[in-house]
Amino acid sequence: MSSSVLLIGQPNCGKTTLFNTLTGSLQKTGNYPGVTVERKRGTLLLDERKVEVVDLPGIYGLEPNSIDEKISVERLKENNIDTILAVVDTTQLKRSLGFILELGAINKPIVVALNMSDIAESRSIKVDHEALQKKLGVPVVPVVATKKNSLESLKKVISFYDQNPTKPQQIKAFDTVKERLDYVDEVLSEVVSAPTDGDRISRKLDAILLHPIFGTLIFAAILLVVFQSIFTFSSIPMDFIEGSIESLGAFVSSVLPEGLFQSFIVDGLIAGVGSVLVFLPQIIMLFFFIYLMESTGYMTRAAFLLDRGMSLIGLQGKSFVPLLSSFACAIPGVMAARTIKDERQRLTTILIAPLMACSARLPVYVLLIGAFVPATTVFGFLTAQGLAMFGLFAFGVVAAIVIAFLFRKTTLKGNSGSFVMELPSYKMPDLRLMAVFLWKKSMNFLKKAGGYIFWVSVTLWFLATFPQAPTDYDQPDITYSYAGRIGKFIEPVFEPIGFDWRISTGLIPGFAAREVMVSALATVYALDDSDDEDVVQKSLTEKIQSSWSLATGMALLVWYIFSPQCLATFMVAKKETGGWKWPAVMFFYMLALAYIGAFITYRIFV
Amino acid sequence: MSLTLANAKKQKTYQVSSYSADSESTQRQFECLGFVKGEEVSLYQTSSFGGPLAINVRGSVIAMRLSDAEQIFVKELS
């Protein structure tokens, strides 16, 4: 039987959790052809047979409002041997039952899963599912999607339908929505007994969390904690990873004979791939917070609070998640923009995502602030250096606001976009599911970022190593290589903003990946590759302090805020936008901002 | 002067009476969410500075911008 089970339901009903529990690791994800809607298919093992399960994007009704909703409706109506597994939040029957009735029009067998039956029970909501089954004429099975062993009855029903493809049941049809909902009220009055005051816990929480003043303050505090965690707390595991990479490099150096191959492995591969691994703690930390906010339902509250501000620049509350993610790394940020249904708003969000100061900029920021900003205390615990760091971040955000505003007024002009969003009741996050989520996201990041960075590292190693300088060469070896020659060649372009050939040489590898700039500079200044990073850092800091002017240092800082120096981001943007046009726009506007900004800064300080 | 959802105040109940003239797609979208003629709704939470509203409807909470709320006419019950 090559039939499929189509998982459908209204948003927030726990459909995807059910999908994950039913199919486990037997999942395939990809895209629907031509669109950036994720196609999720998996295999459910029933006794000895395999059944394909498809997790369709959630819809509120059979009238689609966006691309992903259109895909759901099209797939539901497709001429196929399907069983529709309609997932419903048991605490939301009043709204979702009407949807089940609508599904009858599709003329395929339906099985109803009453999900979150545990939450319903805890709120004293009692549903006589057998009576409901009689009324509807379709099987109705209570489940708890997070608990595998509650799914046995559901699996039996699916198995039955899979082996006996029958005529679909006749569900009552209605001419108007009102008639349908009146019928729903009638059925529910017979089948459900529930307290009338709804979800009191969520109401009480929202009285504070959605309060215009307190809610906003709490949200700001939460953001502060998130940033602090990403940039400070992750330093411990990051240092650990960095140390391990160096040890590995040292070990391999000692084992392999000196020469090109050793250099390739140690300076090319290990250093290159290692530079991606170092960011992993921050990525995990970021996704940890995102999962927490998403699974508890708080994320919708954040979008609610931010929507007004976002609408002033032509975006909406949901743009917040991609932009927040971009502070750790723009790659997951750009991909997260898929949740924004309005295409022009989505594009705008993608275009400004790289302006959010990402982790890769930190090594350069730290180096330059350390060299040129005095470590004096300004007020209490605030230091000039700390403020400078904050200033760099803020500058990027301000620029993003302006750019978004401009794009939305010109090439990406559109309607103000609608913002209609359900605020689901607050829920406790499931730790096991969180672990699975973090694992998936980490692997995804490693594959994407790691893939590009690997090739970048190899190419850069090649450019910086060949042609090899003769042994009596009196200048740093790198100037003899392709990279050095290119650096000298483009030096005139950067002269007006205060960059000498050394900096422009460092920028070449730095263009493919931001964080590479620091080690590239170290190489250009012909420093020994000491095992102790602090030694290298300090001596590089001293070298820079002595050979660069304050103006140059400041100009490079401002350059770095805007400069489009991440190949991986462009590749992801190309995939998400379906072409080279928008990544090119992104590249050129950022380059323009970087040059102009650096130019003005240089002239101010010189 | 007709009341719309945008005028909703806390502690009061309203009944959906009609949609504004040029809002067919809005109407379909909102009806799916439960905003049908005769349905009882109430205000869950409001925002400052012209931000979105959150409305109780059929056991769930739906957030929408003022521009959307202005298209749904209501009658005050009490």
Image (spheres, rainbow, N blue to C red):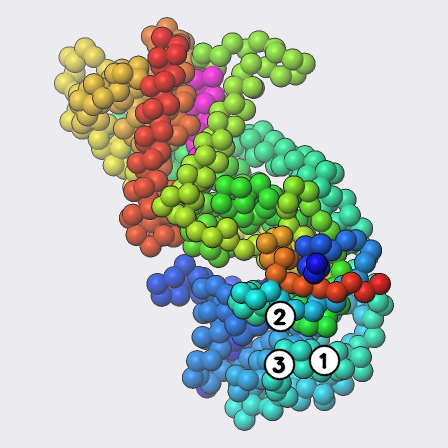
Residue A145, can we see it? Answer: no
Q: Residue at x 26, y 20 (%)?
A: A494
Q: Residue at x 46, y 85 (%)?
A: A81
Query: Same chain for the residues at labels 2 and 1, yes or no?
Result: no
The amino acid beneath tag 3 is: Thr
Under circle 3, the secondary element is loop
Q: Residue at x 57, y 66 (%)?
A: B21
Residue A295 inside the magenta-drawn segment: no
Query: Measured from the top left, where is residue A170 in percent x and y?
Result: 60, 91
Question: Is A94 placed left or right of A528 in the picture?
Answer: right
Q: Chain of mark 3?
A: A
> Residue A176 has which mark?
3
The amino acid beneath tag 2 is: Glu
Query: Measured from the top left, where is residue A591 in percent x and y?
Result: 32, 31
Q: Residue at x 85, y 68 (%)?
A: A195
Query: Same chain for the residues at labels 3 and 2, yes or no?
Result: no
Residue A231, can we see it? Answer: yes
Residue under label 1: A182
Under circle 2, the secondary element is helix
> Could you tell which of marks 3 and 1 lies nearer the N-terminus?
3
Q: Which residues are magenta?
A: A354-369
Residue under label 2: B31
Our reading of the magenta stretch's main secondary structure is helix
Of residue A317 and residue A477, the one placed in the foreground of this image is A317
